Image (cartoon, helix red, strand yellow):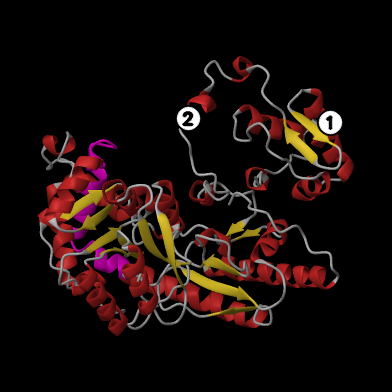
Amino acid sequence: MDISKYLNSTELDTSNKQPLYLQISLLIADKIQKQILPSGTKLPPERELADLFAVSRTTAINAYRKLEQQGLVWTKVGSGTYVAQARDLESLSEVPWPQLFTAYPQNPLASILRDLVSTNAPGTISLAAGMPDPALYPLETFTELFNHNIGTVPPADFGHIPTEGYYPLRRAIAAMLSEKGIPASTENILTLSGSQQGIYLLSKVLLEPGDYVVMETPTFIGAIQVFQAAGARILSLPYSEKFSIELLEDFLIRYRPKLLYIIPTYQNPTGRVMPEQERKDLVKLAKRHRLVIVEDDPYSDLCYGEQPPQALKAMDSYGGVVYLGTFSKILFPGLRTGYLAGPPVLINRLALEKQFIDLHSSNIAQWLVTMFLNEGKLAEHLTKVRREYKKRRDTMAKALLRLCVKDIDFKVPEGGFYFWCKLKQAGTSQQLLQAAAKNRISFVPSEAFHTMPTPDNEFRLCFTTHNETVLLESVQRLAKTLTQITKKIKDNDAPPSSVWPII
């Protein structure tokens, strides 16, 4: 178990009178007592712990000695330091909670989505989380809409509403989709607490342990985790410039998968856009095999040049494409408002499942989004953010070409949030990430986006969260890190490869 991800985001307070070794021991003790680090967990070697906190090896040794004195860890000569067995569970908690929990995925990246939105260490520039820039949130518009309309809304609209969602919003979303060539009415729409909830609901309704699911690789972290947690067996379509329709057909014949999950427009993390003919071929194949396609489309409104092809759902002639959308990327994540478009029979079944989770999504958020759509504010906002994000994309692309081109390959994305980069030199993105943490920059290595071990020489950079000045500084820090790690590798002194900081 790699515990560095639980420790890396924490900075020691050098101004504190408390010794550094004691600060480290208290931090690890807290993780042990909260059962974040369960009994038997192997802790980092002393040298690695020292590097993690930028302290001397003596300080790291003293931290472990303190924990050993407290009975929280034990050391096996020649093997390492381990979390001790809890001798008195009542001293840790009145209820032995860990003994009551159901099994959970033991994937070392299981907490990555939570980690990605965690607060960074001071001064760190995070290019990790796929976030719009808070400076561009349309908060003034939402405030005006709230103030001008709160007195006119029927009070009953803020009571319990149907699980399917606020009817005026479902109607507005159906109209919005129809403009995109996706025929829809209110009975085809389910509002969600973010599109991630839609993936989860689909897994609950469609999947049983052992069912097969087809996914591109690399792909969205959240979808991988949901399907793995459902006990699905993942069939991976390796990334290439051309969608692997032949391999998919082979999967369909041999395994009869329940569904295909795909992001055809500005794919996360690669940024790839599936061409129109490939989309038609995919829908044609899926229709022949009656395959459910889950089309996740968070980014298609964020295009910075030529418009992408129509959504797969717009080409759906057999009712098998389930379309997921969200307002998190184009407005702001705190709305927690997304939607799913599908046949009424599926909407009804998903609503039955959703009522067990939250009864219905937030009324106020749905009401505000409804007014935003009905008053034509979305088009104006999209024009603004597209213009700004295009400038940021171009700024980062030029900086990467100028400072990092000898070390990485990348393509300029046509839309969305991300650059997908590949190391030219020896070494891994995990090694790069550990070195980058010391230069106060973070990103997501390729390991997080795959369903099985792969060569770890790629990583994702998000260019939308920060302004151009910060982006330039981030690329300078990345270039510095690339130079440092290249030198270390040449000197045969590469840093350890298993590192995942909380970012």
* In the rendered image, the vertical position of residue 12 relative to residue 144, given as above or below: above
Q: Can you say which quadrant of the picture contains the N terminus?
A: top right
**Residue 203, position in %: x, y?**
32, 50
Q: Quadrant of residue 62?
A: top right
Q: Residue at x 47, y 79 (%)?
A: 240
- Counting other residues with Cα less than 10 Å from the Cα at mark 1, is it few (<14), some (14-19), or many (20 or more)? some
Horizontal arrangement in the rendering, residue 459 relative to residue 492 (left or right): left
Q: Amino acid at mark 1?
A: Arg
Contact? badges 1 and 2 (CB < 8 Å) = no
Q: Residue at x 25, y 80 (%)?
A: 280
Q: Residue at x 47, y 67 (%)?
A: 217
| Label 1 residue SS | helix
The majority secondary structure of the magenta stretch comes to helix
Q: Quadrant of residue 33?
A: top right
Q: Amino acid at mark 2?
A: Phe
Q: Nearer the viewer, residue 202 or 502?
A: 202
Residue 101 tag number: 2
Q: Which region of the structure is painted magenta?
A: 354-382
**Residue 426, position in %: x, y?**
72, 74
- Which numbered disc flags the more N-terminal residue, 1 or 2? 1
The residue at the far right in this view is: 58
Residue 65 tag number: 1
Q: Nearer the viewer, residue 442 or 330?
A: 442
* In the rendered image, the vertical position of residue 392 relative to residue 117, given as above or below: below
**Residue 325, position in %: x, y?**
28, 60
**Residue 459, position in %: x, y?**
58, 67
Q: Nearer the viewer, residue 235 or 159?
A: 235
Q: Residue at x 64, y 47 (%)?
A: 9
Horizontal arrangement in the rendering, residue 130 relative to residue 245 (left or right): right
| Label 2 residue SS | loop
Q: Quadrant of residue 362?
A: top left
